[in-house]
Structure formats: C-alpha cells, structure tokens
Image (cartoon, grey):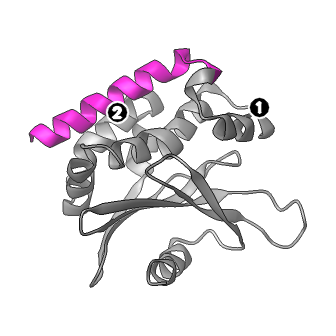
Amino acid sequence: MPGSRIIRNTLLLSVMLLPGCGAASFPATARAAEQASAPATQESDTIYALHHMIIPGILFSDKGPSLFNDLFSGNSTPFRDIVEGPLGKKYASDIKITPVHLQEFDIVLLSFPEPLIEKLCIHAALIRKGETYRYVTLEKGGDVSSNGTKGFFCEWTAEYVHQNYGQREYTDVSEFRSELITFLNK
C-alpha cells in the first residue's frame, strides 16, 4: 500500500536521524523536560522521540490520514516494522493497538510497553473527527507530592504545543479511554 510505504519511510528517516541530532532540533520545552528526567539512554531518547515527535509529527502532516487509516483498519505491520528497526521486535510487538469507533470520533489507542522513565507515554490516542486530528497522551509521571500521581493527561497540538491537563492516579487503558471520551465530548 503506497501510504504505508510513505509512513514507513518517514518513520525510518526520523528515527535514523534522531541519534545524531542536537538540542536545536528539539523544542525547548521538550528538551528541558527530557533533561529534568532521570539520565536517559539512547533507547529512551528514541522512545521519547517516537511518542512525542514522530507519531504526532506524522499524524499532523499530509501523511496523517494514511497512518490513521492503516492503524484503524488493523494494518499495523508497516508501523511495527519501523518501530522494530531502532527499538527491537519485542518493543514493537508489545505495543497494543485498539481502534475505537464512536458516533463523532474514530480513535486509535496505543498502549506502549511500561515506560522506565518519566515523560514517556503509557498510552496515546490518535483521534479523528472529520478531517481533524488530535493526539492525546497519558505520560508517566512521578508522585512528587505524595498524592498518588502515576501519570499526566496531556495533548500535543498540530502546532507542536504540549498541553498538560494535570495529574492522574491511574495507568489503566480503560480509565484512559473513559476519560478521553469525556474529554472529547466537552
């Protein structure tokens, strides 16, 4: 499928360029958040790029409909093949992809392998309403205030602005899905 090949090539190019990129290629806020977290390995840098830059970057590009349609229809092979290149077969195969059809929205839920460091996504949602796309995440977060925080409900906009909607005390995909549906219907 031509769209799948475009997505595959875009992901591959993005991931191949990541290890050699400098701080200037990251938005300042993302770079500061990355530096504030525990020392990261090259693998966690690549996972961070996948979660916060590559997936939303493709979703908000002219290749977004192909990515969304492939994942929504169950054609996850091109996506998994690209993830497998830099992150290994186990990481790629452990990503759970769940399409959800609602009256006004179509959603692709991505559940990632358990993140080892903060700021990596636990779950992400690719959302389509008509021809508009959104990217909402549940990111791993520390419980610095001892109130039970396990993550943060966030969104990356098409303008690459990170919105943080606050702390959450859950990591379960069903709770993320439930909150996401309430959030989208506001």
Of the two numbered discs 2 and 1 in the rendering, the one whose residue sits closer to the viewer = 2
Where residue 22 appears, x then y in whole percent? 60, 18
- Nearer to us in this view, 61 or 176: 61
Label 2 crowd (10 A; few <14 / some 14-19 / many >=20): many
The answer for how far apart the CA atoms under marks 2 and 1 are is 25 Å
Residue 39 circle label: 1
Extreme-right residue of the structure: 145
- The residue lying at 45 percent from left, 80 percent from top is 181
- Nearer to us in this view, 88 or 1: 1
Q: Is residue 9 magenta?
A: yes
Callout 1 amino acid: Pro
Residue 110 circle label: none
Determine whether, in the image, residue 126 is placed left or right of residue 68: right
Q: Which residue is mark 2?
A: 11
| The N terminus sits in image quarter | top left
Most prominent secondary structure in the magenta stretch? helix
Q: Is residue 83 above or below residue 114?
A: above
Q: Is residue 163 magenta?
A: no
Where residue 37 appears, x then y in whole percent? 77, 40
Q: Point out the stretch of residues depicted in magenta.
A: 1-23
Give residue 92's quadrant in the image: top left
Callout 2 amino acid: Leu
Label 1 crowd (10 A; few <14 / some 14-19 / many >=20): few
Where residue 162 appears, x then y in whole percent? 59, 52
